[in-house]
Image (cartoon, rainbow, N blue to C red):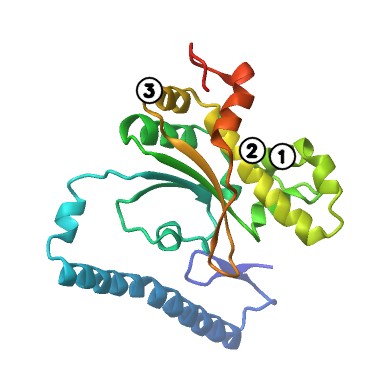
């Protein structure tokens, strides 16, 4: 069988769907789908103009002041989930929070992206608080609980699976699957906070000035509320310093 170019860089097989009626319907559907996609895309720019107008209407030099520099108090390390809006959930404005997001809010020492973010936030921006924020209903954490091959995600989700291994006794003792899932979300935040504290720049900055303080939060998608896990930062410092102290001083 031969093939006939359909004008979009693809072809339709002869004797298959290569009929005038099919081709007409195909192009009509494609055109409608494209219009819908572009309509949403173009709407973003209209919303942007509206947002700019609202901001400058209240404060004419708003963006001029914002462009002068940033001095955030917080570094927010969160999940990439689109339902977790860092600034809005915290009631903060642009310039208030330095943000890094990835699947399941993982802090891995082999990830140059997050290592660079933390270094810049701590050494150059002098942030006072580092927040690791997970969320209930996290797809990354749920995927890590499944015994299946997830391809390229395997390496990344191993970080979360390692958390399960470390806390296996506690998690396996929870009979309700949903509660076990929620607890792993919390424990993952705890372990990622510990990973932050293990970093040399965080330790040195804390010894020099008493900050940054590391916090663990969980965002509840169903209520919009943030739960503070109330981590004992000083206790974490004490627990890790025998093995992970990268300074020449006691951390606590």
Q: x, y (%) of residue 129?
A: 42, 41
User: Mark 3 and mark 1: span between their CA atoms?
Assistant: 31 Å
69, above or below 80, in the image: above
Please name the residue that numbered disc 2 is placed on: 191
- x 48%, y 68%: residue: 8
Q: Quadrant of the N terminus?
A: bottom right
Determine the residue located farthest toward the top in the rendered image: 248
At mark 3, the secondary structure is helix
Front position in the image: 202 or 140: 202
At mark 2, the secondary structure is helix
Left or right: residue 151 versus residue 111 is: right
Q: Nearer the N terminus, badge 2 or badge 3? A: 2
Q: x, y (%) of residue 226?
A: 53, 59
Please name the residue that numbered disc 3 is placed on: 208
Left or right: residue 100 versus residue 222 is: left
At mark 1, the secondary structure is helix
For residue 163, the mark is: 1
| CA neighbours of label 2 inside 10 A, class few (<14), some (14 to 19), many (20+) | many
């Amino acid at each position: 069988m031969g093939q006939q170019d359909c004008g979009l860089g693809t072809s339709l097989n002869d004797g298959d769907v290569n009929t005038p009626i099919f081709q007409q319907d195909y192009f009509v559907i494609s055109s409608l789908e494209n219009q819908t996609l572009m309509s949403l895309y173009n709407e973003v720019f209209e919303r942007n103009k509206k947002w700019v107008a609202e901001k400058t209407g209240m404060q004419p030099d708003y963006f001029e002041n914002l462009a002068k520099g940033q001095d955030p108090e917080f570094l927010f390390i969160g999940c990439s989930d689109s339902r977790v809006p860092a600034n809005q959930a915290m009631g903060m404005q642009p310039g208030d929070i330095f943000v890094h997001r990835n699947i399941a809010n993982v802090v891995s020492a082999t990830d140059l992206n997050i290592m660079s973010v933390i270094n810049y936030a701590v050494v150059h921006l002098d942030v006072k608080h580092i927040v690791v924020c997970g969320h209930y209903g996290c797809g990354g954490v749920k995927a890590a609980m499944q015994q299946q091959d997830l391809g390229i995600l395997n390496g990344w989700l191993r970080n979360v699976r390692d958390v399960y291994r470390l806390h296996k006794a506690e998690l396996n003792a929870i009979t309700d699957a949903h509660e076990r899932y929620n607890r792993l979300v919390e424990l993952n935040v705890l372990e990622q906070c510990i990973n932050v504290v293990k970093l040399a720049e965080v330790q040195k900055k804390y010894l020099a000035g008493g900050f940054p303080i590391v916090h663990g939060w969980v965002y509840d998608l169903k209520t919009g509320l943030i739960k503070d896990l109330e981590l004992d930062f000083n206790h974490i410092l004490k627990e890790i310093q025998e093995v992970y102290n990268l300074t020449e001083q006691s951390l606590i």
